[in-house]
Image (cartoon, rainbow, N blue to C red):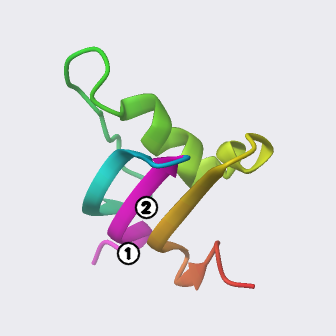
Amino acid sequence: MLMNKFTVDQLSFYYGTKRALTDVSISIPDRQITALIGPSGCGKSTFLRCLNRMNDTIPGTRAVGKVLLDDEDIYAP
């Protein structure tokens, strides 16, 4: 049985008032290859930065929703 490494539920991401991601939900299984494809500007890099919390260093940004890594919310206080 495959376990999920990441579970993303209703993730939206904002640069100030501009919403860059809208209600993204996806399960990413452990020990599997996952590809993100899409046109330029669709939010692939922003989504990856959300998984790594790299957007935390950018003033005025915020993530809304849940990102679970091994069933632990990485954005929980």
Q: In the orientation shown, which residue stands out farthest toward the front?
A: 17
Prevalent SS, magenta region: strand
Q: Quadrant of residue 58?
A: top right
* Local secondary structure at mark 2: loop
Q: Nearer the viewer, residue 24 or 6?
A: 24
> Residue shown at 75%/85% (left/top)?
77
Residue 30 numbered tag? 2
Residue 32: image x %, image y %?
A: 36, 49
Q: Is residue 47 left or right of residue 15?
A: left
20 within the magenta span: no
Q: Of the residues shown, which amino acid type is indicated by label 2? A: Asp
Location of residue 36 with respect to 72 vertically, above or below: above
Say whether marks 1 and 2 touch (CB < 8 Å). yes
Number of residues whose C-alpha sits closer than 10 Å to that of mark 1, classed few (under 14), some (14–19) or many (20 or more) = few
Number of residues whose C-alpha sits closer than 10 Å to that of mark 2, classed few (under 14), some (14–19) or many (20 or more) = few
Cα separation between marks 1 and 2: 6 Å
Q: Of the residues shown, which amino acid type is indicated by label 1? A: Met
Q: In the orientation shown, which residue stands out farthest toward the top?
A: 40
Quadrant location of the N terminus in the rendered image: bottom left
Residue 12 numbered tag? none
- Whichever of labels 1 and 2 marks the residue nearer the N terminus, that label is 1
Label 1: which residue? 3
Q: In the orientation shown, which residue stands out farthest toward the left?
A: 38
**What segment is highlighted magenta in the picture?**
1-15
Q: Is residue 52 left or right of residue 13?
A: right
